[in-house]
Image (spheres, rainbow, N blue to C red):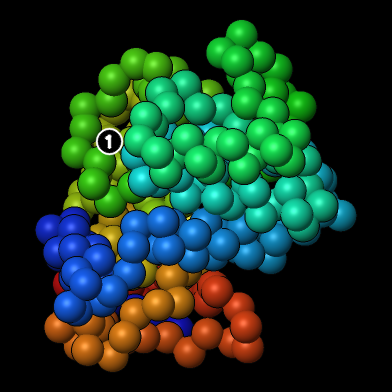
Amino acid sequence: MSMKAISSKDATSLDKDLMDQAIGGWSLDQLMELAGLSVSQAIYRVHPPSAGKDVLVICGPGNNGGDGLVAARHLAHYGYNPSIYYPKQGKNELYQRLKTQLTNLSVPFIPEADFQPALKSTSFIVDSIFGFSFGGPLREPFPSIISAIETASVPVLSVDAPSSWDIENGPPKEGPGAKFMPQFLISLTAPKPCVKFYRGKHFLGGRFLTKGIAEKYGLVVPEYPGVDQVVELDIDAEGKL
C-alpha cells in the first residue's frame, strides 16, 4: 500500500497533538515503546535470528535513539544478541530508564574503541541516530559514524529517515551520507518527504493514529495485518505532499 508523506513541521505538530491530554492522551514513553516495538518487528521480518543474531543498534541523543534502545530490548527478548553504540547519550530520566532495562538484560554498550570491530563482527545494523527533526549540519562524532555505516558490508535498517538525510530534500550532495542508501527503512507514524529519494524495502510503524488525528493531517491509517505493528509500503507511490 502507499501513504502520503508528512512534512517535518506537520510531524512535529502531530506529535504534540498525540501528547496533548485533551486530544491524543499519549505520553512520550508510550509512543517510544510502540515505535521501538515496531522497529523490532520490522527487523524480525527482514532479518530473523536464523540470519544472524548479532545486531548493532547505533543510537543518537534524542527520541530516535530512544526508539533504538526500546527496539534493542525487544530484540534481546526475541533471542538476538543486540549491542548498543550510544556515543552521545540522552540525559533525561526516560533514556536512563531504558539504559537500566538493557543493562538488566546484559545488553552491552560498546565503547568508542570497540565501534569499528563491532561493525565488522555484526550481522545487521540499526541506524537510530536522527529522525524527522534532524536539520544538519552533522557534528562529531556523527560524520565518521555515518561514513562507517554507509560503507558497512551488512544490511542496515534506518529508523524514520536515513541519518544525515535532509527530511525534505533527501541525501546530502556530498560528504558523509551522500551515498547512504540503507536496505531497509521504517517510517514512524507517517512517511517523511525524503522517502521519494529512497530505494529499498520500506515499512510503516506506529499503530496508534486515531481517525480524527489522521484526518487532520490528511493521512490514511493503514490496515495492519493481525497483531503486527508494521506494514510494508509501496515506495514508488510515496513522497507526494
Name above or below for residue 55 compared with residue 117: below
Q: Residue furthest right?
A: 50
What residue lies at 86% left-to-right and 54% top-to-bottom?
50
**In front of the other: 90 or 219:** 90
Q: Is residue 74 left or right of residue 6?
A: right
Residue 146 placement (x, y as % from top left): 44, 28
Q: Quadrant of residue 142?
A: top left
Name above or below for residue 72 compared with residue 60: below
Q: Residue furthest top?
A: 113
Q: Quadrant of residue 237?
A: bottom left
Number of marks in picture? 1
Q: Is residue 90 left or right of residue 166?
A: right
Q: Is residue 187 visible?
A: no
Q: Is residue 122 left or right of residue 170?
A: right
Name above or below for residue 35 compared with residue 222: above
Q: Quadrant of residue 15?
A: bottom left
Residue 21 placement (x, y as % from top left): 21, 72
- What amino acid type is highlighted by mark number 1? Pro
Name above or below for residue 228 compared with residue 129: below
What residue lies at 47% left-to-right and 21% top-to-bottom?
87
What residue lies at 74% left-to-right and 48% top-to-bottom?
76
| Disc 1 packing (10 Å; few <14; some 14–19; many ≥20) | some
Q: Secondary structure at mark 1?
A: loop
What residue lies at 22% left-to-right and 89% top-to-bottom?
212
Q: Looking at the figure, which quarter contains the C terminus?
A: bottom left
Residue beneath disc 1: 172
Q: Is residue 106 visible?
A: yes
Q: Looking at the figure, which quarter contains the N terminus?
A: bottom left
Residue 79 placement (x, y as % from top left): 82, 52
